[in-house]
Image: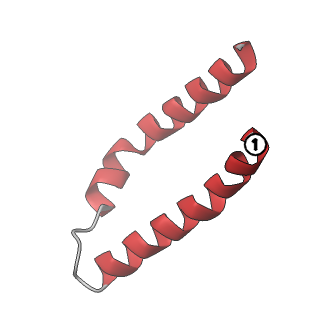
Amino acid sequence: MAARSRSLFLPLALIAVGAYFLLARLGWLPSLHQWVQHWWPLGLIALGLLLLLRRLS
C-alpha cells in the first residue's frame, strides 16, 4: 500500500502547483515570485535532508 500512496504524490503535487500558478496568474492568489526568488536554496537544503534521512533509515 505504501508504493501506491508514493506513486500518487508527484501527480497530486504537480496538480497543486499548477493550480496555484494558474490562480496567481489570474490574480486570485498572491504571487510567490519574490519568496521563491529569495528562499529557493532552502528548498534544496530540505530536499537534500529528506533524501539523506530516507537513505539512513
Horizontal and vertical percent position of residue 47: 57, 35
Residue depicted at 71% across the width and 13% down the height? 56
Residue depicted at 50% across the width and 31% down the height? 46
Tally of numbered discs: 1
Residue identifier under label 1: 1
Outermost residue toward the front? 1
- In the depicted structure, whether residue 23 falls above or below residue 35: below
Outermost residue toward the top? 56
**Quadrant (top left, top right, bottom left, bottom right) of the N terminus:** top right
The picture quadrant where one finds residue 23 is bottom left
- In the depicted structure, whether residue 13 falls above or below residue 49: below
Residue depicted at 78% across the width and 44% down the height? 3
The answer to whether 41 appears left or right of 56 in the picture is: left
Colour option used = secondary structure
Element type at mark 1:
loop
- In the depicted structure, whether residue 27 falls above or below residue 36: below
Q: Amino acid at mark 1?
A: Met
Residue depicted at 57% across the width and 24% down the height? 49
In front here: 7 or 53? 7
Horizontal and vertical percent position of residue 27: 22, 82
**Quadrant (top left, top right, bottom left, bottom right) of the C terminus:** top right
Horizontal and vertical percent position of residue 19: 43, 74
Badge 1 crowding class, 10 Å Cα cut-off, few under 14, some 14 to 19, many 20 or more, is few
